[in-house]
Structures are given as C-alpha cells and as structure tokens.
Amino acid sequence: MREFLILLAMAITTNITAKPVYEHGLLDIDGSETSLLKHKGKVMLIVNVASRCGFTRQYKGLEELYEKYKSKGFVVCGFPCNQFGKQEPADEKEIKEFCTTKFGVTFPMFSKIEVNGATRHPLYETLVGKDSPTKGNVKWNFTKILVGRDGKPIDRFGSLTSPSSSKLGKAIEKALGE
C-alpha cells in the first residue's frame, strides 16, 4: 500500500509541474499575449528561427509545409531566437517584415525567446527539458520539434533536416493520421 501511495504522489506531482504546451503564456510577433491553445488538437511543428542564418532559407520550406498540411490540422509555429551566433538581432517588427516580404510567411510567428539555459522559455522546457521525449539542448537555429495532436512532443529534427525532407514529411503525415 505504501509503494502505491508513493507512486501516486509522484504521478500527481509530475502532472502538476509538467505544464502542457498549450498553457504557456506567449507573445505573438506583434507583442499581443497569446498561447498555443488555439492550436489544441493540431499537429504542430515548433521551430526556433533566425533571419541571418545559413538555414534562413528554410522559411520558404516551412511555409510550403504549412500550406500543404494546414487543412488537415497542421501548423508551423516560428519562435525567433538570438542565442546561436546572434543571428536574430532584429526586433519583432523587423522580423515580421523580413519573413513576410522575403519568404511569404503566413504561419504563426511569436516574439523572441530563449530556448536554452537558465532563461529558457517554459515552453521549451516542456519541449526539450529533462522530462521530454525530445530532451536535450537545442543545438542551432531551425531545430524542429514535432508535437502531436495531444500536445506532446513526438520527434525532433535538427537544422540539417530540410522542411522538404521525406523523413520530416512522413513524420508529419503519421502524426496527422493518429
């Protein structure tokens, strides 16, 4: 009985401290308070982005993925981050203008956040923290984290994985089918 109570207490504590991705407070690219709640039930590809990176051209492929799958319940969410080589020094207004005019981005973009370290945004703690199936520090810009319809991280793809890769496409299609 004692072991059962200990396990129950651990389960309750874990559920209290592990906040679902939908419940984290965020700011959109225009500075308005928001969250991922409007995407609840969708498959999400959460990407830390930067405008002055060798992988910046991936914005185009991310937009193509979004257009291809959005009618099936898929969304790309872009989170600018300046932690890697200081490759996102611009403010949100400049980032939005750059993404929309140069790459035609229509998927949701958010305000700059940090994805690693002591000031890591709580959303990324949920996505890559020690209790996540996709745990481990983000290594560079354009790391992609696939989140299932249940709001739980499913898979992780590094910067070298192009948005047009068959591996990523198959993972998205599998998640959409679940």
Image (tube, rainbow, N blue to C red):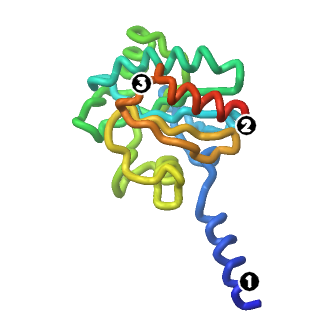
Number of numbered tags placed on the structure image: 3
Residue at the location (49% across, 15% down)? 105
Give the answer, above or below, for where 106 lies relative to 135. above
The kind of residue on which mark 1 rests is: Phe
At label 2, counting other C-alpha atoms closer than 10 Å, the crowd grade (few under 14, some 14-19, many 20 or more) is few
Q: Point out which mark residue 162 bears.
A: 3
Q: Point out which mark residue 178 bears.
A: 2
Residue at the location (41% across, 8% down)? 101
Q: Are marks 2 and 3 in contact (CB under 8 Å)?
A: no
The kind of residue on which mark 2 rests is: Glu
Q: Nearer the viewer, residue 76 or 36?
A: 76
**Label 3, label 1: how far apart the Cα atoms are:** 46 Å
Q: Nearer the viewer, residue 129 or 37?
A: 129
Q: Nearer the viewer, residue 170 or 70?
A: 170
Mark earlier in primary sequence (2, 1) = 1
Residue at the location (38% across, 9% down)? 102
At label 3, counting other C-alpha atoms closer than 10 Å, the crowd grade (few under 14, some 14-19, many 20 or more) is some
Can the viewer see residue 111 in this picture?
A: no
At label 1, counting other C-alpha atoms closer than 10 Å, the crowd grade (few under 14, some 14-19, many 20 or more) is few
Q: Which residue is label 1 attached to?
A: 4
Residue 98 position in % (x across, y down): 37, 15
Residue 139 position in % (x across, y down): 32, 43
Classify residue 84 as left or right of residue 66: left
Give the answer, above or below, for where 34 lies relative to 6. above
Mark earlier in primary sequence (3, 1) = 1
**Label 2, label 3: how far apart the Cα atoms are:** 23 Å
Tell me where residue 172 sits by quadrant.
top right
Q: Secondary structure at mark 1?
A: helix
Q: Secondary structure at mark 3?
A: loop
